[in-house]
């Protein structure tokens, strides 16, 4: 029963994520926001995401009696309140400005907690397949992208927020009926390590820091395109419907890779999959430079099978293997902070300014160069060389990169 509940949670979350993250730009644009203002909103949302994720991760790692279920319910409730204000006060510019970055940040914070929740259930001996459940989430994202693109094209952008609120309410009900992980507390107490503070974490896991830096650069351009998708689609002759098609295809392309993620990790090892993902990301953004029509821009996103599809599961298991169990939630949260926070902030700020003042092609050139640098760092992070301070015994001898 639990595996179906968790899969439903992933499905509903990624539908809501698609709505508030990918369609926030068209909502704000319809309410009079220009690209710079949109970039400011999403940037503040990313900064708030970083603060909340690191605060929540530290609290969750340190205070085991505070369950992830309780935290998730609080985050969903907060996002629901913010979206409700925007829904009932559509003409208030500052209400939209503030409530939108609150809703964006609270939605972003949920993602690594869902990963940690699955790992906790697995630690209890409850077989929840993260890859399969996450692929169902990608299916929800794909279906929602296609449907929302058509709905907003036909009924306007104001329909987005009420749909988001309804789905959030359903997620609150679903999480309420899910059991709390019970035995994780005793497992943590058996660990010889103490939970690291944030400064200690950065000095304790040098390989993780290089890995995180590579991931941030790998997804810089993807974060930029996600925020300003409508501008890229219009550059190639499309509109809201085509935007929905792009989002849908992107998610559908990920599904097989994510569903088979656990099997692929066991067969090829996560570091190999991360390298493939890094190369695929660079190929995607370099290929868009040669596109001139929407009919070619859309199919390029099928490369997400190798890009974000392979990265999604392999990054979870790679991160889980190179940090101690007592720092597990922090390790997953930092990955999300890196992409939705640091990468998101820089992409939103740079993207908003560049889209207003420079051609889209110049933005794409910058994105391709940054993606290439990210691939270089990812290859280094997943190599066989030994980083300063690395000791397999420090985390129970479970480090993947020492495997042969």
Image: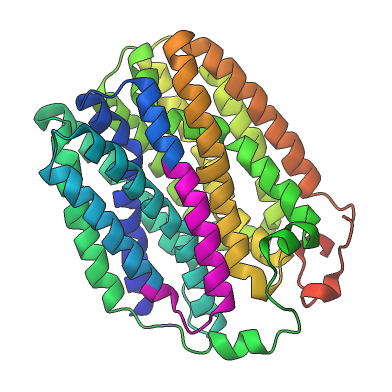
Along the line of sight, which residue is nearer the eye, 166 or 195? 195
Residue 399 within the segment the image draws in magenta: no
Lateral position of residue 246 relative to residue 221, left or right: left
What's drawn in magenta, residue-wise?
45-70
Along the line of sight, which residue is nearer the eye, 325 or 317? 325
Lateral position of residue 82 relative to residue 66, left or right: left
Residue 59 within the segment the image draws in magenta: yes
From the top left corner, tell me how far across and down residue 86 is, in percent: 19, 43
Q: Is residue 320 above or below residue 272?
A: below
> What is the quadrant of the N terminus in the image?
bottom left
Lateral position of residue 396 relative to residue 374, left or right: right
Q: Residue at x 42, y 43 (%)?
A: 45
* Main SS of residues in magenta: helix
Q: Is residue 281 above or below residue 329?
A: above
From the top left corner, tell me how far across and down residue 374 is, in percent: 69, 35
Residue 390 seen anywhere in this rendered image of the structure: yes
Lateral position of residue 310 relative to residue 87, left or right: right
> What is the quadrant of the C terminus in the image?
bottom right
Q: How many marks?
A: 0
């Amino acid at each position: 029963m639990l595996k179906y509940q968790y899969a439903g949670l992933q499905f509903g979350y990624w539908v809501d994520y698609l709505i508030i993250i990918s369609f926030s730009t068209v909502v704000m644009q319809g309410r009079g926001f220009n690209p710079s203002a949109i970039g400011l909103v999403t940037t503040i949302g990313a900064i708030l995401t970083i603060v909340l994720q690191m605060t929540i991760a530290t609290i969750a790692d340190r205070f085991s009696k505070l369950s992830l279920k309780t935290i998730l319910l609080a985050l969903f409730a907060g996002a629901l309140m913010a979206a409700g204000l925007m829904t009932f006060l559509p003409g208030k510019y500052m209400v939209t400005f503030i409530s939108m970055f609150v809703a964006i940040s609270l939605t972003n914070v949920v993602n690594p907690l869902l990963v940690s929740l699955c790992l906790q259930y697995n630690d209890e001996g409850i077989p929840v397949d993260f890859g399969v459940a996450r692929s169902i989430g990608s299916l929800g994202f794909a279906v929602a992208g296609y449907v929302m693109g058509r709905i907003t094209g036909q009924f306007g952008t104001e329909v987005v927020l009420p749909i988001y609120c309804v789905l959030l309410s359903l997620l609150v009900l679903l999480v309420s009926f899910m059991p709390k992980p019970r035995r994780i507390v005793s497992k943590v107490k058996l660990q010889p390590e103490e939970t690291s503070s944030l400064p200690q974490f950065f000095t304790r896991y040098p390989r993780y820091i290089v890995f995180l830096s590579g991931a941030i650069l790998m997804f810089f351009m993807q974060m930029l395109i996600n925020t300003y998708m409508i501008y890229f689609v219009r550059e190639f002759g499309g509109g809201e419907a085509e935007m929905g098609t792009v989002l849908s295809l992107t998610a559908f392309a990920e599904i097989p890779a994510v569903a088979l993620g656990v099997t692929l990790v066991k067969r090829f090892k996560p570091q190999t999959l991360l390298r493939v993902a890094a190369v695929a990301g660079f190929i995607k953004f370099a290929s868009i430079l040669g596109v001139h029509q929407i009919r070619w821009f859309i199919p390029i996103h099928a490369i997400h099978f190798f890009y974000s599809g392979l990265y999604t599961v392999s990054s979870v298991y790679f991160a889980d293997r190179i940090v101690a169990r007592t720092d597990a939630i922090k390790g997953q949260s930092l990955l999300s902070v890196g992409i939705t926070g640091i990468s998101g902030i820089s992409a939103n700020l740079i993207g908003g300014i560049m889209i207003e003042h420079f051609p889209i092609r110049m933005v794409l050139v910058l994105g391709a160069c940054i993606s290439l640098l990210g691939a270089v760092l990812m290859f280094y992070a997943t190599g066989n060389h030994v980083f300063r301070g690395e000791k397999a015994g420090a985390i129970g001898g479970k480090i993947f990169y020492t495997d042969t």
